Image (cartoon, helix red, strand yellow):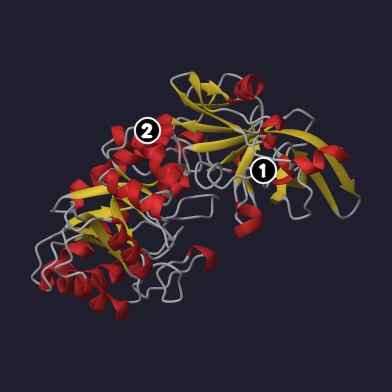
Amino acid sequence: MTQTIASLKPFEAERDTSSPNRNLAPITTALDGEDRLVIGGCLLSELAQRYGTPLYVLDEDTVRATCLAYRDALQQHYPGTSLPVYASKANSSLLMSSIAAAEGLGLDAVSAGELLTALQGGMPGERMVLHGNNKNDEELLLAYDNNVTVVVDNQHDLDRLKALIPADAEPARLMLRFTPGIECHTHEYIRTGHLDSKFGFDPDQLEPVLKSLIGQPWAKLTGLHAHIGSQIFELEPHRDLAAVMADALKLARDLGHPVEDLNVGGGLGIRYTESDDPPSIDRWVQVVAEAVTKACRDRGLELPRLMCEPGRSLVATAGVTLYSVGSRKTIPGIRTYVAIDGGMSDNPRPITYQSLYTCCLADRPLAAADETVNLVGKHCESGDVLLKDLPLPTTRTGDVVTVFATGAYNASMSSNYNRIPRPAAVVVKDGSSELVQKREQPDDMLRYDVLPERFHAVR
């Protein structure tokens, strides 16, 4: 059953600045004198009134604390050099790019749009990697021109780069991605390390590809990459991954490639409900770092620079989404539906992955639940159910609902289904709020529509 904040421990007990991925709410979450919900020193119901709803709210302190947690853990547990790389697909914005850059992280992008966002947000190209299983020429050239390492996913990437880069030019920095053949207990759509995946070279392709790159003037292979999935609570698969990657590293170096980076991807889960129990950031990094260190030393390898790609675990808990309650429908003996002014267009994860969340009323977070409802969106889909079988205090039209841990894969996966404008987003810190994403307007839905001239006469 979906959790409400009223059933949880007091807010003070929920805070863990050393590992925010284990929190249910941002680290600055508090109650004011009237027991109303405050994040980043800002009263949430006042944010809703000022900016409108739906509204994405991001707590800056939580984002920075998570960046620091990854940096510190890598420095503590890995004896070589390291670089945490923000997986920007989780939440791509100028703000997130700027924070990640300022906190000393790198960034991974999967499109020209994410590349441009990161570059304009201040992220140095030298600290970026470009992923993607079907990169086009524009994306490859944008990465090359800005010194971004290209994560080679398949032969298509190699063929296009060879055609695009002159033989007498600086070689492209490449990182070779392969599937390690490791399965994790996570949703089918977010498992990427098993063999049946659209991402990366198969293991038996690794040696032929490495040999084909020997002596190529346009290519400089500097790294290896593998990723086993997302929202993972298990630790053992990461130990297994270290051994597989160390074997690949030895092979690459034996063939003469100057591989200095080992990128183990991301995948650490976060706490969406009280029953979720992910490892802490420190524990996850410790397991990865110790496993990579041992695997390399067992094979007589000089330690590579260790890279990891946190996305969800870096930004999810820092974000909440605010909605306003609208209509209500009660079917006696069956169910009560409470509708909010957003839904599947601003959070597609429940309808896509059957994801669970924790929520509460912004101005009555500790009120006892006296009914069970389905919290539903406003879209023309029966499946547009944000939270199912949700215990809540009786709601009134205009009440502000707070849904926690929406900082990842909400804004970045949002859509204009039913031509509903995307929400605004704000960042909060020390009692101040600043707009970081303007709210779309209905007129914006027509911005790129074109009506051919021959249809004008029949209007």
Q: Quadrant of residue 453?
A: top right
Give residue 252's position: percent from left, percent from top.
Answer: 17, 70
- Label 1 and label 2: CA atoms lie apart by 25 Å
**Residue at position x 30%, y 71% from top?**
240
Which percent across, then down, holds residue 6? Answer: 62, 39
For label 1, the residue is: 416
Answer left or right for 302 relative to 67.
left
Residue type pointed to by label 2 = Gly
- Circle 2 is placed at which residue position? 121
* Circle 1: residue type: Asn
Work out which residue is located at the far bottom of the displayed protein and give it: 204
71 above or below 134? above
Tell me residue 417's x, y (percent). 70, 46
How many marks the image carries: the answer is 2
Q: Secondary structure at mark 2?
A: loop
Residue 288 visible in image? yes
Check disc 1: other Cα within 10 Å, few if <14, some if 14-19, many if 20+.
some
Q: Residue at x 24, y 48 (%)?
A: 83
Q: Nearer the viewer, residue 396 or 444?
A: 444
Is 116 drawn above or below residue 272 in the view shown?
A: above
- The residue at 36%/44% (across/down) is 19
